[in-house]
Amino acid sequence: MNYSGAAPTAAVAKARLSFLAAIRRLPQADLLWVQLLDREIVDLAARDFRRNPYADPSPELEQRIERWAVTCYLADRPVRNWWIFSVAREVLRYRACGPLTSGFPGEDDGDETESVGVPVALSEDPQQLTYLHSDWDLHWVTERRYLRSEMRAFKRHLEEHIKTSRLLAAKPAFKIVNRRDSKHFEWLVKYQVLGQSFRDISETRSEKRDPGTVKTTVLKLRNLVGLPGRRSAGRPRK
């Protein structure tokens, strides 16, 4: 089964962003990213991507990503067939290299290289402008060079955001994820990542929902996002 989806539908892409955004909203679930950015994994990524930022992960790094994804119940083996592999690869690539560079001087500055790809902060609202800047290594990069590189990358991101917003506005069926839907993705994170049962989720003070309603909603979202069953991922059923 392949959940990578080279070109997922708008609904699937939106659902995946909402799922990742929900992880960020729940502090206890955010540990997932801490595990991915384990020092040993980051060192492997630096070894692979600093030679060639556009290279595929080495078998050793891919194995570590697979172990992380399966342990966190985000994918089943082989993890390369799941969309979360691309997310993990880009997070590690960005951590190792920052914005990808062309490797050639900028046209108007002999010592500058231009950013050509900057991961953006994830948001469940596709019309909300978000941008993740690169860190400034002031020991190796001048302030002027860093500022120009970031401004160029941000300009490209802003232009892409405007284009996307216009396309979304042209679709009458498009609907921003509302607060209720956002809460449903938090249920999915609590079940899939944190291992809570449907009853545990339904009995939370802020929820007080019927366990059957929680179960139906969570399983529908899990299928839409593209996540493995908890049992198939090796986790005992509660």
Image (spheres, rainbow, N blue to C red):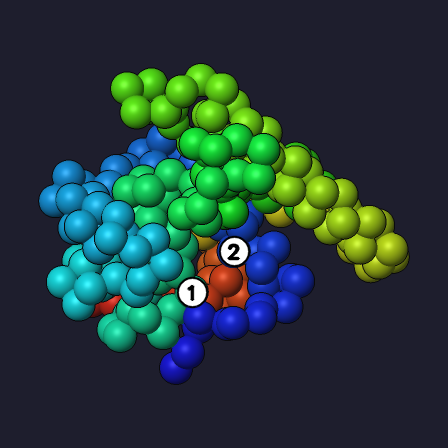
What x and y, as percent, mark residue 53?
A: 34, 53
Q: Which mark is residue 16?
A: 2
Question: What residue is rendered at 76% in x and 49% in y?
Answer: 163
Name, please, the residue furthest toward the bottom: 1
Q: Earlier in the sequence, mark 1 or mark 2?
A: 2
Q: Quadrant of the N terminus?
A: bottom left
Q: Which mark is residue 83?
A: 1
Q: Nearer the viewer, residue 65 or 145?
A: 145
- Classify 47 as above or below 38: below
**Could you tell me the amino acid type at mark 2?**
Arg
Choose top left, top right, bottom left or bottom right for residue 156: top right
Residue shown at 50%/72% (left/top)? 5
- Along the horizontal axis of the image, is 83 left or right of 40? right
Residue at the front extreme?
110
* Position of residue 104 measured from the top left corner of the image (x, y, whole percent): 44, 46
Q: Secondary structure at mark 2?
A: helix
Q: Dot 1, crowdedness within 10 Å: few (<14), some or many (≥20)?
A: many
Q: CA distance from mark 1 to mark 2?
A: 9 Å
Whether residue 230 is visible to the viewer of this picture, yes or no, is no
- Displayed quadrant of residue 236: bottom left
Give the residue type at disc 1. Answer: Trp
Residue ID at (20%, 64%):
58
Q: CB under 8 Å between callouts 1 and 2?
A: yes
Q: Is 82 on the left or on the right of 39, as rendered? A: right
Who is closer to the viewer here, 5 or 201? 5
Assign a secondary structure to mark 1.
helix
Q: Position of residue 198 (x, y in %)?
A: 40, 53
The tally of labels here is: 2
